[in-house]
């Protein structure tokens, strides 16, 4: 290891905070963009253009939850278990 455990853990938490901020930006900007085109319709479907930004909002929220899980686990000195094992 190149860094002591305390330093490495602090850096990992900081990285997860940055990832959470990125996810928050995705949620916020996806929401704002979706609202700005809510009254327009997708031609041929008749659905709101705002629906195109729903995946951005949902994926941003999932990224935030992922980061929160890792930060909480790090503070409790636990390992995050992958769901696919």
Image (cartoon, rainbow, N blue to C red):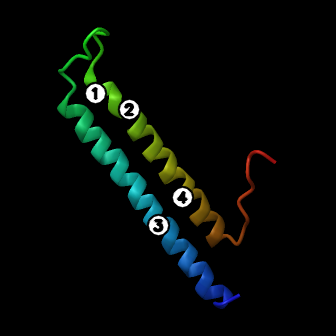
- Which of the 4 image quadrants contains residue 7? bottom right
Residue wearing tag 1: 50
Q: Residues within 10 Å of mark 4 (few under 14, many from 20)?
A: some
Q: Name the spot of residue 62 as percent of width and height, x first.
A: 51, 45
Residue wearing tag 4: 68
The answer to whether the residue labelled 2 contacts the one labelled 1, judged by CB atoms less than 8 Å apart, is yes
Q: Residues within 10 Å of mark 1 (few under 14, many from 20)?
A: many
Disc 3/disc 4 C-alpha distance (Å): 8 Å
Residue wearing tag 2: 54
Of the numbered discs 3 and 4, the one sitting upstream in the chain is 3
Q: Name the spot of residue 50 as percent of width and height, x first.
A: 28, 27
Q: Relative to 23, does residue 8 appear above or below in the rendering?
A: below
Disc 4/disc 1 C-alpha distance (Å): 27 Å
The answer to whether the residue labelled 2 contacts the one labelled 4, judged by CB atoms less than 8 Å apart, is no
- Which of the 4 image quadrants contains residue 46? top left
Residue wearing tag 3: 17
Q: In front: 7, or 53?
A: 53
Q: Name the spot of residue 59 as percent of width and height, x first.
A: 47, 42
Disc 2/disc 4 C-alpha distance (Å): 21 Å
Q: Name the spot of residue 36 as percent of width and height, x first.
A: 18, 33
Left or right, 76 with respect to 33, comes to right
Mark 2 vs mark 4: give the one in front.
Answer: 2
Of the numbered discs 3 and 2, the one sitting upstream in the chain is 3
Question: Under tag 1, what secondary structure?
Answer: helix
Q: Relative to 58, does residue 6 appear above or below in the rendering?
A: below
């Amino acid at each position: 290891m190149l860094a002591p455990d305390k330093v490495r853990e602090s850096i990992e938490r900081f990285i997860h905070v940055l990832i959470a901020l990125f996810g928050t930006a995705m949620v916020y900007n996806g929401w704002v963009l979706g609202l700005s085109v809510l009254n327009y319709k997708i031609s041929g479907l008749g659905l709101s253009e705002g629906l195109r930004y729903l995946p951005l909002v949902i994926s941003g929220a999932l990224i935030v939850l992922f980061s929160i899980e890792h930060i909480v686990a790090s503070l409790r000195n636990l390992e995050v278990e992958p769901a696919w094992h």
